[in-house]
Amino acid sequence: MRITADRDRCVGAGMCALLAPTVFEQDDDEGRVVLLAAVPPGEHAAVGEAVQCCPSGALTIDEP
Ligand code: SF4
């Protein structure tokens, strides 16, 4: 799985970091998303849920 995070669209809601904390973090300044790592195999479901729950549509799955 490969994902992209559009930091310009991110509104810092934090759902992604809550649902998949090994993959997503929020920066200290504005709380916008930061990708921490490639998606580990065991995290696919959590990342998929994060993409669906993101209120700004900032997360995109490029490769399932
Ligand atoms: S869930 Fe979406 S809006 Fe919220 S921090 Fe993550 S990428 Fe940004």
Image: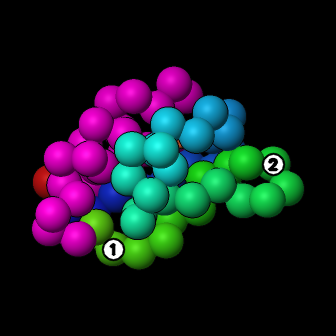
Q: Which residues are magenta?
A: 40-63
Looking at marks 2 and 1 on the same chain, the residue that comes earlier in the sequence is marked by 2
x then y, percent, for residue 49 = 28, 37
Q: Which residue is mark 2?
A: 30
Quarter of the displayed picture in which ligand 1 can be seen: top right
- What percent of the width, then of the height, locates residue 44? 19, 55
Instruction: Answer yes or no: is residue 9 visible.
Output: no
Provide the secondary structure element on which disc 1 rests.
Answer: loop
Q: Position of residue 21 (x, y in %)?
A: 44, 58
Q: Quadrant of residue 9?
A: top right
- Res 4 → quadrant: bottom left
Tell me which amino acid carries mark 2.
Glu
Residue found at x 68% / y 49%: 32
Kindly tell me whether mark 2's CB lies below 8 Å from ligand 1.
no
Three-letter code for the amino acid on which mark 1 is drawn: Ala
Q: Is residue 40 above or below residue 11?
A: below
Residue 43 forms part of the magenta stretch:
yes
Q: Residue drawn at (46%, 32%), measured in percent from left and top?
A: 54
Looking at the image, which residue is at 15% across and 63% down?
42
Q: What residue would you read off at disc 1? A: 38
Which residue is drawn at the image coordinates 39% and 28% (left, top)? 53
Question: Is residue 56 at least partly visible in the picture?
Answer: yes
